[in-house]
Amino acid sequence: MNRGIFGIHHVTAITSDAQRNIDFYTNSLGLRFVKLTVNQDDPTSYHLYYGDELGRPGTILTFFHWPDAPRGHRGTSEVIATSFLIPENSINYWIDRLRSKQIEFRGPYKRFDDEQVITLHDPDGLELELVAHKSAEERTVHVWKGGLIPAKQAIRGFYSVTLSEEGYERTASVLTDELGFMPTRQDGSRFRYEIPNGDAASPGEESRGANIVYVLCIPYTQQAVIGIGSVHHVAWRTPTDEQQMVLRRNIVRAGLNATPVIDRFYFHSVYFREPGGILFEIATNPPGFMIDEKLEDLGTHLVLPPWLESMRKDLEKVLPRVQLPKKDTE
Ligand code: ZN
């Protein structure tokens, strides 16, 4: 039964180099740079956002720019892979593209009977996957037509995230009982959970897909250290503030600590740690990235939430200069 979660809202990771990050995600992967802003909890550092044309929930990858953070170490209790959806017949295009840009990759390899997977890393070492799956046909809305990749081959938002855990049952019970995921596949220590697809057309929910989470049990490794090249947290999307409150209440009833609702300006957020220790967020779909920029201007200049606007001059002095993608992209 749907609990008010429809899939991934955004994934937030950590980068050491804002410019290299912008170049990689816009030039190499062809995402739209949708917002240059600051970390609300640490406004002297950037918060970078990528996505489809609007930065719709289900397509948003964000980065904290923390050049002085320690390097991340892979292990349990983290989002160990972030996967983008690509069309089934685009595998060869992507292989050629990665080769021409001298980006190392593994694959393509088959996962279950319906996925073709290419694994690669961003310049900070963040593990990414390009997953070719037939559901890409239904998600043409997420193609960024102004980007550098032809629409036929372009990324169509997220496909999944993979959580690395020591064990799985308690994490699984939060995914299923609180967030509404259903167990659908298992292969050894890899478990797939999905928000049933039919639910994706509910009122206020314009995104589809990005509705898969993998749990991968790797008990023999160490706990992950979250740092540069790691995912910081994953956010799940919910259409309304009311649904968010119900979800929050259920999460607290399940014995987990949760933050109050925090206004992130582009969405409203509640954070909690799932039993395996990974930071989860529940984020509302509205209001979205056009609250402070027009569609054509998204990502073209530094925007600050209203309560930080009075600090703009000081912040601009300490934030490093970055070259943003041009309007209309090349
Ligand atoms: Zn977040």
Image (cartoon, rainbow, N blue to C red):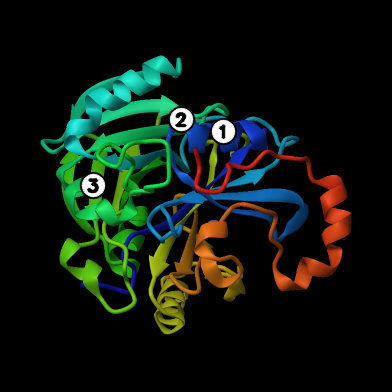
Q: Quadrant of ligand 1?
A: bottom right
Q: Is residue 216 visible?
A: yes
Q: Which residue is mark 2?
A: 28
Q: Earlier in the sequence, mark 2 or mark 3?
A: 2
The type of residue carrying mark 3 is Arg
Label 2 near ligand 1 (CB < 8 Å): no
21 and 33: which is toward the camera: 33
**What x and y, as percent, mark residue 265?**
61, 70
Q: Position of residue 136 (x, y in %)?
A: 21, 47
Comes first in the chain, label 3 or label 1: 1
Amino acid found under the numbered disc labelled 2: Ser
Percent position (x, y) of residue 318? 85, 46
Quadrant for the N terminus in the image: bottom left
Disc number at residue 43?
A: none
Residue at (41%, 75%) from the top-left corner?
Answer: 247
Observer-side mark, 2 or 3, equals 2
Quarter holding residue 116: top left
- In depth, the one of 256 and 264 nearer the eye is 264
Q: What element does badge 1 sit on?
A: helix
Q: Badge 1 local density, few (<14 within 10 Å), some, or many (20+)? A: some
Report the residue marked by disc 1: 23
- Secondary element type, mark 3: strand
For the residues carrying marks 3 and 1, which lies nearer the camera in this image? 1
What's under tag 1, amino acid-wise?
Asp
Image position of 174 (left or right of 286) = left
Residue 109 higher or lower than 56, as above or below: above
As measured in the structure, the alpha-carbon distance from the residue carrying label 2 to the one carrying label 3 is 29 Å
Contact (CB < 8 A) between labels 2 and 1?
yes
Relative to residue 124, is residue 65 drawn left or right? right
Q: Which mark is residue 192?
A: 3
Image coordinates of residue 205 in percent, x first then y, are 32, 71
